[in-house]
Amino acid sequence: MFGASAAAYLGDIIPALSGHLPRVIVGAALLTFFFVVNLMGIDIMASAQKLMTWLLIAALILFAVVGIARMKLPIFDFSDPNFLINGWGITFENGQISGGFIGATLLFVYSTQGYYMTTAYGGDSKNARRDIPIVLLLAVPTLIVLYVGVAMAGVGVMTVEEYGASTTLVFAAQRIFPTVLFYAFIIGGPIMALLSTLNSSFAYNAITIGQSCDDGWLPKAFGKKNAKGSRVWILTFMYVVGMIPIVFGLSITVITNMVQLIGACFAFLNFVAYIKMPKLYPNAWKKSRFHIPDGLYYLICCISLAGFIVTLWKSCLSMSPGLAAANVAAIVVLAIIGIVRGRKGEIEVHTSIWSGDAAEDAAAAAIGQK
């Protein structure tokens, strides 16, 4: 999806790349590049990610500051007839969600939950218990400032009608920047955002799927590592899967809804783990610098679950009935396979991050062996 989106951006600024075949070639080339980067190991991947992230932040800040300074439209005039032209709620066309503020917000959720991937790097972090929570907490205000700033600039210099069928910031950037800065922004901003996500998606999924191989849920051979510690077959599988929407030109919105549907289902599994955590690690939980009263903690977990339920509902309604049914059926079948495989006693859960309390770590390990 991210390779296809990056190709779409390049197609908007370079007319020769706007056709289907050029977009396939560009998308495939970008996907191949980051496939190779991740094959070279986590250190190379992290170095590339760090560079792209700083370029992205700089580009988005530049766009927001310059765009807001040149903003002409009354974006905060709630009485303007062009304000929320699709309404506050979710509108439907042919039984599917087609717009509205809430619908846009739920689609936006997918663009702001990438920080969740940070949890997968705990095993490779020098001090996971300190670093991972800080990163997660700092991600929220950073996203708010950057995304709100970019949104204000994007809608403050152009009307919805002027955007037309475009779903990118290309035309807004053309109004905001001189030519040189325009190209610098497109490469450092939107394209870098997509490529950094593409890069981290390879790494994140290789780690999580690889852990499933180590634990016995998937064939251990599938999780084979090369000399650099990269999961060769998992990365290859992801590469092939990633090539499908590029080659066939699948709708990015449909793909996003499918991913959100699967992610919402994962949330149910995570919810069970979150609820059990205070009782499984009572001492470590009480000593945590992020400790809050249990009642408040459970309330936050339930609110989060409710949000994912809404996302699940929205994802199903945003797809055709047949596609939604196929996705739900696939999830159910895979869940049944997981339950059956888990009952065969061939699963050995390996926990990579421990609480530091020997007794509680031993208890958690014992649960993993059941």
Image (cartoon, rainbow, N blue to C red):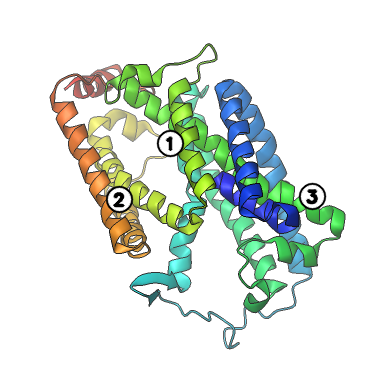
Where, by quadrant of the figure, is residue 330 drawn? top left
Q: Say which element carries label 3.
A: helix
Between disc 3 and disc 2, the foreground one is: 2
Q: Of callouts 1 and 2, which one flags the residue occurring earlier in the amino acid sequence?
A: 1
Q: Amino acid at mark 2?
A: Asn
Q: Which residue is mark 2?
A: 327
How many marks the image carries: the answer is: 3
Between disc 1 and disc 2, the foreground one is: 2
The residue drawn where x is 50% and y is 24% is 127
Where, by quadrant of the figure, is residue 123 drawn? top left
* Image position of 98 with respect to 42: above or below: below
Residue 289 badge: 1
* Image position of 189 with respect to 239: above or below: below
Q: Amino acid at mark 3?
A: Ala
Q: Of callouts 3 and 1, which one flags the residue occurring earlier in the amino acid sequence?
A: 3
Q: Residue furthest top?
A: 227
Instruction: Indicate the position of residue 315 as horizontal and vertical percent values.
Output: 36, 59
Q: Say which element carries label 1.
A: loop
Residue 184 badge: 3
Question: Distance between the Cα atoms at labels 3 and 1?
Answer: 42 Å
From the viewer's perspective, is 157 left or right of 25?
right
Q: Tag 2: Cα neighbours inside 10 Å, few (<14), some, or many (≥20)?
A: some
Instruction: Indicate the position of residue 280 as horizontal and vertical percent values.
Output: 24, 31
Between disc 3 and disc 1, the foreground one is: 3
- Callouts 3 and 2 close, C-beta under 8 Å: no
